[in-house]
Image (spheres, helix red, strand yellow):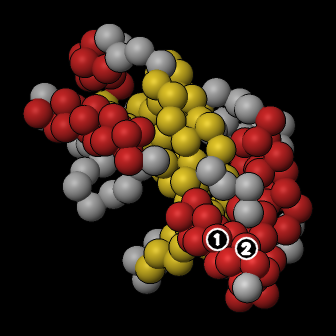
Amino acid sequence: MMQSVELLLNAEMDAHIRSQWESLAEAGFHALRPHHRPHVTVGVAQEIPPQIDRAITPLFWTLPFPLRLGGLVLFGEKRIVIARAVTMSRELLNCHQRLFTVMRECPGQPLHMEPGKWTPHVTLAKRIPAAEVGRAVEILATREDFTGAVVAARRWDGQRKIETIFASAADLAGHLTQGNSAADS
C-alpha cells in the first residue's frame, strides 16, 4: 500500500467535484464517493518516514494558491480512470518540484510522479470498462473549466487509512495572526 502527499481543494471546488461523482454514481458508475476526498496527488511513495514529514510541512507555507480544473483526461486501457485535468501554474509546478526534491529518498516512488512526467488531475471515477467510457464522458463533458484554490495539504496513509494534515490556509492564517499580535504587544 502506498502513502501519498495530496493537495486539498477549497469548499466550492470540493463540492463541484462531489457533484460530478454523484452524477456518475446516479448513472451506475463506480465514482469516488462518499468516503473519498477530492484532491491532487503531488507525491507518492511506499513509505514517507517521519523526518520527511517534518521537511514537507514548510513546503506548504504558500497556501492558499489558485487551481484551475480543465477538461477530462483518461488513464488506463481495459479499466479506465476518468479525471479532470489540472491546469499547470507556477505555484503548482514549484510545489511539485520542491516536494519531489524532499521526497527523493523515499522508497517506491512511481516514475510517473517525477517532474516532467507527472500529470496533475482530480480523479472522478475508477475501473470504468472501456466499452462504457463514452457514456461516462457524455455525463461529464458538458462541465466547464472550474477555478478554485488549494487550501490544505495532507499525507494519506492508504494502508492504515490515516490522514495527516501538513498545513492548511486557515492554520497558516491563524499562525500569522498570532505572530503579528504577539509582535504588537
Q: Do the residues labelled 1 and 2 touch (CB within 8 Å)?
A: yes
Task: Name which residue type carries label 2.
Answer: Asn
Q: Where is residue 62 in the image (x, y as percent from the top left)?
A: 74, 55
Q: Position of residue 18 (x, y in %)?
A: 29, 42
Question: Viewed as shown, does residue 27 lie left or right of 50?
Answer: left
**At 27% across and 61% down in the image, what residue appears?**
35
Task: Name which residue type carries label 1.
Answer: Thr
Q: Residue furthest front?
A: 185
State the residue in front, 126 or 124. 124
- Secondary element at image label 1: helix
Question: Viewed as shown, does residue 137 lie left or right of 48?
Answer: left
Q: Mark 2 points at which residue?
A: 180
**At 11% across and 33% down in the image, what residue appears?**
26
Q: Position of residue 144 (x, y in %)?
A: 41, 15
Visible in this render: residue 37?
Answer: yes
Image quadrant where one finds the C terminus: bottom right
Using the image, determine if residue 100 lies above or below residue 163. above
- Secondary element at image label 2: helix
Q: Mark 1 points at which residue?
A: 177
Q: Which of the 4 quarters of the picture holds residue 159?
A: bottom left
State the residue in front, 59 or 61. 61
